[in-house]
Amino acid sequence: MAADPTQQQLALVLGADSSHFESLISNLLSSTNDQRSQAESLFNLCLQTHPDALFLKLAHLLQSSPRPEARTMSTILLRRQLTRQDANLWPQLAPSTQSSLKLVLLNSLQTEDVKSITKKLCDTISELASVILPDGGWPELLPFMFQCVTSDNIKLQEAALLIFAQLAHYIGETLAPQLSTLHTVFLQCLTSSKSSDVRIAALGASINFIQCLSNPSDRDRFQDLLPLMMQTLTEALNCGQEATAQEALELLIELAGTEPRFLRRQLVDVVSSMLQIAEAESLEEGTRHLAIEFVITLAEARERAPGMMRKFPQFIQRLFAILMNMLLDIEDDPAWHSAETEDEDAGETSNYGFGQECLDRLSISLGGNTIVPVASELLPTFLAAPEWKKHHAALIAFAQIAEGCSKVMTKNLEQIVSMILNSFKDTHPRVRWAAINAIGQLSTDLGPDLQVQHHHVVLPALVAGMDDFQNPRVQAHAASAVLNFTENCTPEILTPYLDGIVSKLLVILQNGKQMVQEGALTALASVADSSQFQKYYDVVMPYLKAILMNANDKSNRMLRAKAMECISLVGMAVGKDKFREDAKQVMDILMKLQQAQLEADDPTASYMLQAWARLCKCLGQDFLPYMGFVMPPLLQSAQLKPDVTITSADSDAEIDEDDDSIETITLGDKRIGIKTSVLEEKATACNMLCCYADELKEGFFPWIDQVAFTLVPLLKFYFHEEVRKAAVSAMPELLRSAKLGVEKGQSQGRDETYIKQLSDYIIPHLLEALHKEPEIEISASMLDALNECIQVSAALLEERHVRSIVDEIKQVITASSSRKHERAGRAKEEDFDAEEREFLKEENEQEEELFDQVGDCLGTLIKTFRASFLPFFDELSSYITPMLGKDKTSEERRIAICIFDDVAEHCREAALKYYDFYLPFLLEACNDEYADVRQAAVYGVGVCAEFGGSVFKPFVGEALSRLEAVIQHPNALHSDNVMAYDNAVSAFGKICQFHRDRINATQLVPLWLNCLPIKGDLIEAKVVHDQLCSMVERSDGELLGPNHQYLPKIVAVFAEVLCAGNDLATEQTASRMINLLRQLQQTLPPSTLASTWSSLQPQQQLALQSILSS
């Protein structure tokens, strides 16, 4: 029988003649796919069937092959296969194989003379050791390494240090017992080695080891190495070895990011050296940039060393000056002036770009109180200098620091705005451009204060900037800045300027260069979006349609795209009736465009996605006939796969970091490069899908399935936040569309089981995504979406779903508490200051938003499932009760109280067992210093008074005195307090109604009447005024008083309630009030009637007469 050909191949490859094995290994690197994949299959087969033989062959190749590429490949394969995460092969090998492999690896390290292979051997040894060393699987390794590092052989010293560095990274705790020996070794190598390679390796090993030590006193034992680490850097620079210096800088930057406190004691020396390097113009740009990166990294290490860099203002001044000088590295390139597009940056150097980025990062990390004093010293001198470059640099700096310094800059707005507006008249066009750019950026970062306080100077200046026909770049930028200004602007501010702005934009739309026309369209769109645009429609729309129809050349694609955007925004601004005729024509043009094959880089496609969605928002259900046309390409864009390149973080294959269209992120030991244009199109498409579902409701039914299967997996799309946000927002919209479709008979024969299936698909995936979500803000949106989904699904949810929701809520509360705990730890750091407290407060406010959503979700579950939810509430109480503590924020206390309020209100008798525990908290909180907490507490007291029956009786006395304190407070009716006041009045009324036997009614009922009407909380107002009506209907003696003495007050309350339209009473209550007043007219003696009437204000008398006579 013929032998199996595969077995023959195996026998050859693993046989005595090693040439077969060598050719297999070289075929793994083959450039022809077939040859490579055949080699891979054969290699994997060897691995599965004869692992011992395969590894011994690789070891033999490593030791004996004269070909460096064969030895390299052998080293790489040993590393990959011995330490594979998915298949733990090492324990499956025979002990003799294991011993041989360990021996060969250590021998090869001594004999190998190709440096790149030695480094790869170090990787292989380190990774294998990190798996087997902790369990005593390689006892001879550490003695061998100590022997190498203390030998005279420079190559072995370096190799041992490289391995120590990696082991510290992988299994630092295993090396911890060797602490003092390692300290001595590192000290020795940093002090006396003649080789810069050894010193750099010692630097890397020291830094990794410092990072792996969790105990600060252990770390402090390495403080004496820091001057030597810095010496490694300065010596390399003094010898002109800038590549070595850059390696050292990169290692020190890592230390600054992970263990900034280690540098604290010697910070002055370390940062001084770095700034000296940054100032040395004789050094390479790359070296100087790394030195700056080190200082910025320290400033950004807020979680680990809060406030540390702010203690050294002299450094901040020096660094700011260095960055300002970098901004001067710019040339007046003619290409900038003649550019056809707004994003042409001719003349800007890498220094200039780096300076810009660092100013932004520095101001965000240190804040305005630190940066603004430095800037206000330096920037005016730059603006006063004769050189245009200095003016330009100062204006660019204003724009870069605005985001991080917004609060402080807002206080000095007038001064800043006038400095910038002065430069609108500068003789150099690039300076005028930079001034407009600064106003645009400040409109975003310092809005709406800038708009409110300075519209009268800023808008006319921008309109004047649009007259600069000699300089289209300036003209276009002035038009674009109108967009930034209007985004934070109310119609009231904008309206007086509209005539001037719109007429100017129409002029440049007809006469400007294309770039200027594009800017004008953007500005028109933003103005229409933020104002009353009706009166300009008939003048503007014909121009826009003409561009849309005629801009058909490749060079005009952006102009056409902007016209689309502008038309759709103008349509939304003026509404369906005004836009309907033009809309049809515009949509016909869009349909033709969509059918034409657009080129991949044509911006029309993504603008069209958004324009269709706006047209849908404008036209509502009239848009449905176009959906069959719009949806296929939209789904295609939403389903785009990210264009990703993955390399290992330390690999030599570099992703082009300077390519703007590629964003790089490092995850663990992988570096990922992603094409951003694909992600942006995907995000836009997902947002648009959400818009359609929201706008069309049941009309969206036919697309629900496709959209759900597209968006649900994107809840965990970690490459792009906007994609996740859009997917999250769409979840409740899809459920709502399904529910309305079924209810309104537009569900293609589907019934309620379809809603249940959809809900069963969405909710578990949403919970799973919430569990893994890294961003607090998106977690809050997910809880918000979950809450809406629960509202829509309601009774369709099964107990298992409720169980998983509750479990996830516990997890959210726990994770949030541990983040807050970590922040509280930061507040104890020695350099913690007021600015850090401000940062901390902002971070904790995000947590409050999260808690808010938790409260809403639980409220919805309680309203939906009532008493059957209580077993879950019991489980949660150990998470909720601590939130009532005095040490918690007012928002946490409010949320905890609201949750109990919901339990009391919706579970009624079943909730009585909680009163003894929760009511004392509620009563105390009635007089909390925070109005929102008071409101929640007094509302809860009202609920308990209404439903608590005899269980509430013992609390009546304290409740009344607590409520009176709220009602009689001198500032009770101040706008901050009025909601708490109204709810206290309502609760007081409920005690009067349900517990009259326990109170002095003749005194308290009139006191309650005297507080009416309530006008702040419109929901409570309707309840309270209905109660008043019922009491009058049953002629409540204490309410009317002896001889009906309180009747005038009752009539006055009715009058005020009725004059307020539907705000203060339901229609039903209002008509009962009118009937009561008519009865009074007929039954009261004329004299009583006359005196009652005369107590009203004249306008109330008139209003009542017309209401009663109608």
Image (cartoon, helix red, strand yellow):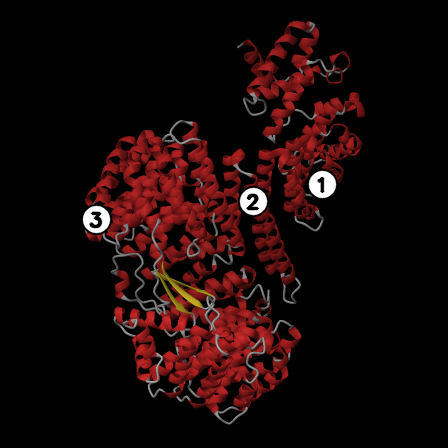
The location of residue 253, given as percent across then percent down, is 50, 73
- Please identify, in this view, whether the residue under mark 2 or under mark 3 is nearer the observer: 2
Q: Earlier in the sequence, mark 1 or mark 2?
A: 2
Secondary element at image label 3 = loop
- Please identify, in this view, whether the residue under mark 1 or under mark 3 is nearer the observer: 3
Q: Seen in the image, is 194 located left or right of residue 32?
A: right
The location of residue 537, given as percent across then percent down, is 30, 35
Rounded to the nearest whole Å, what is the CA distance between mark 2 and mark 3?
47 Å
Q: As rendered, which of 149 and 750 lies closer to the eye? A: 750
The label on residue 925 is 1
Q: Seen in the image, is 276 located left or right of residue 29?
A: right
The label on residue 805 is 2
**786 lies above or below 266:** above
The location of residue 626, given as percent across then percent down, is 29, 36
The label on residue 597 is 3
Rounded to the nearest whole Å, what is the CA distance between mark 1 and mark 3?
66 Å
**1063 lies above or below 1084:** below
Rounded to the nearest whole Å, what is the CA distance between mark 1 and mark 2?
29 Å
The label on residue 688 is none
Q: Residues within 10 Å of mark 2 (few under 14, many from 20)?
A: many
Secondary element at image label 1 = helix
Q: Earlier in the sequence, mark 1 or mark 3?
A: 3
- Name which residue type carries label 3: Gln
The location of residue 195, given as percent across then percent down, is 47, 90
The N terminus: image quadrant: bottom left
Is there a contact, CB below 8 Å, between mark 1 and mark 3? no
Q: As rendered, which of 193 and 360 lies closer to the eye? A: 193
Is there a contact, CB below 8 Å, between mark 2 and mark 3? no
- Name which residue type carries label 1: Ala
Q: Residue at x 53, y 47 (%)?
A: 780
